[in-house]
Image (spheres, helix red, strand yellow):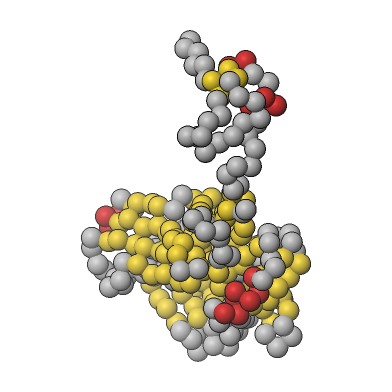
């Protein structure tokens, strides 16, 4: 087993400051290593969900989007970050009439050579939710009728505080 | 905790946000032209169960449809049928099976729907009318 030893040393080139310099991290006490608040901490600012129009089969657009939550201003040089999950209606009888929680924001369908999913972006003072459905075959019927409700995106947005 | 439910003129909630530092957030929403309801709550209202009663300016539960079905399993290819009653006027009805929409009635011009199925399979019937909760029934033909 390889042991890596890290010496925590404060210095002008490091953005981090520690409570005690020159400490070997492999055997140090936590109190000797704890960082102070030199860097603005990220904290949860908003968590929630939003709806985005679903891209139906045969839609000439492969993307749909909707305006999401307004974002609070961040300190100069800092930007809000976000994590998200995609909530989608499911055909699984175990989740009948409900949304399957915690899906990744991307999926593929072997049928119809399809890629679909949802995502988002932060910019212009707001979060924008995006739903996409890339199909290599266009067809008149909707093979995923359970998706006729809107796609729902769940997110957690962080921001810097100073 | 302050939750902001943003809604359309019909009262449909399009997004719900739990804001951890809510000071000034209402002004941000005003500046962006959103209609919203601010609530003191630790949970986010789900779209499936809640909407905003715009007249009363408060959160309200979406009512259940008074829909009933006579049976959920019928014999395929026979005279057997399932009768769905209590469908609200002007509701949209979608019937699908095996991953494809078979019929869309928008709006359905009746308050009852009788379904016969020629081959063994499971038909799903979805009934929608705002602000009712979406109703979905499965009818299996064997």
Q: Is residue A71 left or right of residue A133?
A: right
Q: In terms of depth relative to the viewer, which is nearer, B75 or A18? A: A18
Image coordinates of residue B55 in percent, x first then y, are: 70, 88
> Which residue does the image show at 49% across and 78% down from the upper left?
B93
Say above or below: A108 vs A73.
above
Image coordinates of residue A64 in percent, x first then y, are: 38, 70
Image coordinates of residue B103 in percent, x first then y, are: 40, 76
Quadrant in which the N terminus of chain B appears: bottom right
> Which residue does the image show at 54% across and 78% down from the upper left?
B32
Q: Is residue B57 left or right of residue A81?
A: right
Residue A123 visible in image: yes
Image coordinates of residue B17 in percent, x first then y, are: 62, 65
Q: In terms of depth relative to the viewer, which is nearer, A39 or A152? A: A39
Residue B12's quadrant in the figure?
bottom right
> Which residue does the image show at 64% across and 18% down from the upper left?
A28
Say above or below: A113 vs B35.
above
Q: Is residue B33 left or right of residue A128?
A: right
Q: Residue furthest right?
A: B40
Q: In terms of depth relative to the viewer, which is nearer, A137 or B117? A: A137
Q: Is residue B139 left or right of residue B69?
A: left
Residue A147 visible in image: no
Residue B13's quadrant in the figure?
bottom right
């Amino acid at each position: 087993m390889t042991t890596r030893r890290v010496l925590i040393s404060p210095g002008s080139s490091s953005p981090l400051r520690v409570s005690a310099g020159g400490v070997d991290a492999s055997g140090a006490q936590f109190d000797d290593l704890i960082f102070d608040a030199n860097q603005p901490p990220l904290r949860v600012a908003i968590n929630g969900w939003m709806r985005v129009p679903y891209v139906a089969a045969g839609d000439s657009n492969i993307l749909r989007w909707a305006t999401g939550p307004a974002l609070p201003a961040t300190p100069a040089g800092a930007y809000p970050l976000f994590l998200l999950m995609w909530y989608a209606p499911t055909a699984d009888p175990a989740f009948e009439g409900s949304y399957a929680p915690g899906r990744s924001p991307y999926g593929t369908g072997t049928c119809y050579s399809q890629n679909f999913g949802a995502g988002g972006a932060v910019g212009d003072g707001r979060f924008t939710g995006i739903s996409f459905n890339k199909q290599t075959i266009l067809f008149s019927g909707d093979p995923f009728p359970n998706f006729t409700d809107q796609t729902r995106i769940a997110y957690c947005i962080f921001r810097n505080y100073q | 905790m302050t939750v902001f439910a943003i809604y359309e003129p019909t009262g449909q909630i399009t997004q719900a946000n739990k804001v951890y530092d809510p000071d000034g957030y209402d002004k941000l929403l005003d500046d962006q032209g959103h209609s919203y309801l601010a609530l003191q709550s630790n949970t986010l209202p789900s779209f499936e169960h809640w909407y905003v009663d715009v007249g009363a300016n408060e959160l309200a539960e979406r009512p259940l449809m008074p829909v009933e079905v006579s049976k959920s399993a019928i014999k395929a290819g026979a005279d057997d049928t399932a009768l769905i009653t209590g469908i609200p006027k002007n509701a949209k009805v979608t019937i699908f099976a095996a991953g494809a929409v078979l019929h869309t009635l928008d709006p359905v011009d009746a308050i009852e729907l009788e379904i016969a199925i020629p081959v063994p399979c499971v038909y799903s019937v979805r009934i929608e009318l705002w602000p009712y909760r979406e109703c979905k029934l499965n009818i299996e033909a064997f």
